[in-house]
Structure formats: C-alpha cells, structure tokens
Image (cartoon, rainbow, N blue to C red):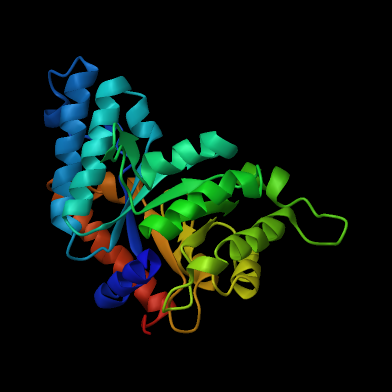
Amino acid sequence: MITDRLIEGIIAMQNPTCVGLDTLFDYLPDDMKAGVTTFEGVAERVFDFNKKIIDTVRDIVPSVKVQIAYYEMYGVAGMKAYEETLKYAAEKDLVVIADAKRNDIGSTAACYAKTFLGETQVNGIARKAFPADYVTVNGYLGTDGIAPFVEECEKADKGIFVLVKTSNPSGAEVQNLVLENGVPMYELMGGLVEKWGESTIGNYGYSAVGAVVGATHPTEAARLRKVLPHTFFLIPGYGAQGGNAEMLKSCFGANGLGGVVNNSRGILCAYKKLGGTYYEAARAACVAMQKDLSNTIGVMKK
C-alpha cells in the first residue's frame, strides 16, 4: 500500500522530509536563466534544475511534492516539464505527490482522479496523463467529490491528501468556524477524511486517504492527531512559512510516525544563503532539516 511504502522510506532514512519542487524560474541561478525568453526555454531549464535536485537528494529523502501552479503559469511547455518531473522522480524511486488541489463532483471528479492517479482509455489502450503516487484534493464539496479519488486509490494503490487545516493564516476564516455541536470545521473535515480512508488502511495503521495539516497550527494539529489515528499527515509550512520542528511535533505519534513534512523554498533556494551550487546547497538543507526533525520527533520506528 502506498502509505506503507512512504512510511518504510521514512523509517529507512530516518527522515520524514518531502522536497517541494515548487520551482519558479526566478529561483534558478542566473547562469541557468541567461538568454531564456520563451516558455519552452523556461520549461527546459526548470526541468534540468529539478532533475539535478532529485539526483542529489534521492538517497536521503523519501518523497517529493510537485506543485502544479508553478508549471501551469508557463503554459503547455510548463505542463510538459511538470509531467517530466513527475515521471523522473518516480524513476528515481521517490514517492511522488502531485500538489494540484483538485475537486469537483461526479464524472468531473472521476476525470481528475484518472488524470493523476489512474489511467485513461484511448481506443482500448490505457494511457497515464500526469502519474503520481498521491494527489492533493479539496474535500469541501463533500463525499461525492472524494469518492472517485478513493476508488482510484483502491484500484491503483494510490493515495490522496485532503485539505483539512492549511498553513495559511486566513484559513482560519473558514476552517476554525465552530459548529453548533462545538466541533470546529477543520475537525469535522478531519473526521470525514478518517471515514473516507477506512477501506485503505495499511500495515502501519494509516490509510491512503491523508490530511493536509499545517505546521503553523500546532494546537489544531495536536487535536487532529488525537482524533485521527489512521490518517497520515502531509505537513506544509516548515521553514519559509514560519513553521519549525517543535511546532509540528504534535503531528507525529509516539513512534515518530504519522506525517511527512514539506519544504520547498528552504531547499530550492538554499544556495542563496549557503553559497555553492544550488544542488549541493539543497542537499545540505535536506541534511539540516533531517537532523532538526529527528532531534525533535525522535526515532521513527515500526
């Protein structure tokens, strides 16, 4: 099961880090940007940048997250770089999260699910569009917007991460609203996620239906960890957004498992602070993050 595979990578590397390949062209070193004036040129350089990052960190991190908006802004060429990045990361045995935050209902949700998790038939031949191990989804349309994704998870051994308590400050405007029964909206959504994942629980006790829980909200994260024993967390907000290891400690259980922590700019742009090549600096940032997390969370074990 895909969440078991992610957990096994975390245990083997003692590292619950996810490298966010949210790769803006502006993040690239000046020599890589020189002379580029077209979206095609941008896409080529961005993919080259991503490949070198992947090659340099694949032995010390278990997963990457590729945020689609950073590629869509470069048009069709950018989407080609997105596809190539997903496939290249998979070839290097990383668990790949497509960060697309998709949602709709009925047949449209089914199309989104096939786009990232399943296959599309073309005259009887199965084709994969943007293949990933997980995709992020917005659950606020309810069960009929999530069911097609869960069906693909069951059929293709894939996973999803549902937005529950996001890292941005204004998320509280909706997510922290308290319902008549005294339960905050984010906890209601978390309960739905736990229910949606009941059919996909793996050997480590976590399902393929995970939750996005921001590192910047430790109180809410602690509450969610307590009431969602079978839900694995994707944890954004570490580093540039202000989250630190101590803040996100509550996302993990006593055995050091329960989540994977995303870091994007802190790794992609590490060379701007550390000097050296961008990929060597990215590796150094991953090593420092691993030490920070493991010192706080403790040993990750079965």
Count up the numbered dots.
Answer: 0
State the quadrant of the C terminus.
bottom left
- Percent of width and height locating residue 141: 65, 42
Q: Quadrant of residue 35?
A: top left
Q: Residue furthest right?
A: 180
59, 203: nearer the viewer: 203
Q: Is 30 above or below relative to 120?
A: above
Left or right: 217 as drawn, with respect to 263 = right
125, 256: nearer the viewer: 125
Left or right: 277 as drawn, with respect to 239 = left
Q: Is 179 above or below relative to 25?
A: below
Could you tell me which residue is drawn at 34 percent across and 62 percent down? 17
Q: Quadrant of residue 63?
A: bottom left
Q: Quadrant of residue 187?
A: bottom right
- Percent of width and height locating residue 278: 17, 45
Could you tell me which residue is drawn at 55 percent across and 56 percent down? 216
